[in-house]
Amino acid sequence: MKHGACFAVAILIAVALLGVVEPAMACPVCWGESDSPMARGMNNGIVFLLGVIGTVQVGFVALFVSFRRRGKECRKHRDSFEVINGGSR
């Protein structure tokens, strides 16, 4: 098949699939039934995933805070050394 014919077949298949999936796209929230078990489960899932994202972000902040603290300690330790003049022959 030529490129144009493949493209036309792909467009035809996409349009046919979009016509078939319309009933599957509806959820209880879209139809106004926000108190259904499915809507509550979806809301619980959203809250859980937001909690996971928040936990990961707090972990990143803690990581960089510990990097900063360790850097300051390392700098203090390095500055505490004294160079002996004429120490090497």
Image (cartoon, rainbow, N blue to C red):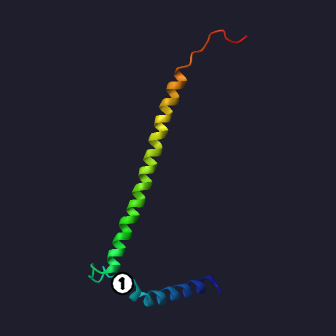
Label 1 Cα crowd, 10 Å radius (few <14 / some 14-19 / many 20+): few
Tell me: residue 79, above or below residue 85. Answer: below
Depth check: 72 or 7 in front?
72
> On the image, which quarter does residue 33 sit in?
bottom left
Residue 18 at x, y = what percent?
Answer: 45, 86
Q: Amino acid at mark 1?
A: Ala
Q: Residue furthest right?
A: 89
> On the image, which quarter does residue 43 sit in?
bottom left
Q: Residue furthest top?
A: 86
Depth check: 32 or 44 in front?
44
Residue 20 at x, y = what percent?
Answer: 44, 90
Residue 73 at x, y = what percent?
Answer: 49, 30
> On the image, which quarter does residue 87 sit in?
top right
- Horizontal side of 89 relative to 40 (left or right) equals right
Tell me: residue 10, above or below residue 73. Answer: below
Residue drawn at point x = 29 percent, y = 84 percent: 31
Residue 21 at x, y = what percent?
Answer: 43, 87
Give the quadrant of the N terminus.
bottom right
Residue drawn at point x = 46 percent, y = 43 percent: 64
Provide the residue designation for mark 1: 26
Residue drawn at point x = 36 percent, y = 74 percent: 42
Give the quadrant of the C terminus.
top right
Residue drawn at point x = 39 percent, y = 56 percent: 54
- Horizontal side of 2 relative to 75 (left or right) equals right
Depth check: 21 or 19 in front?
21
Quick one: SS at disc 1?
Answer: loop
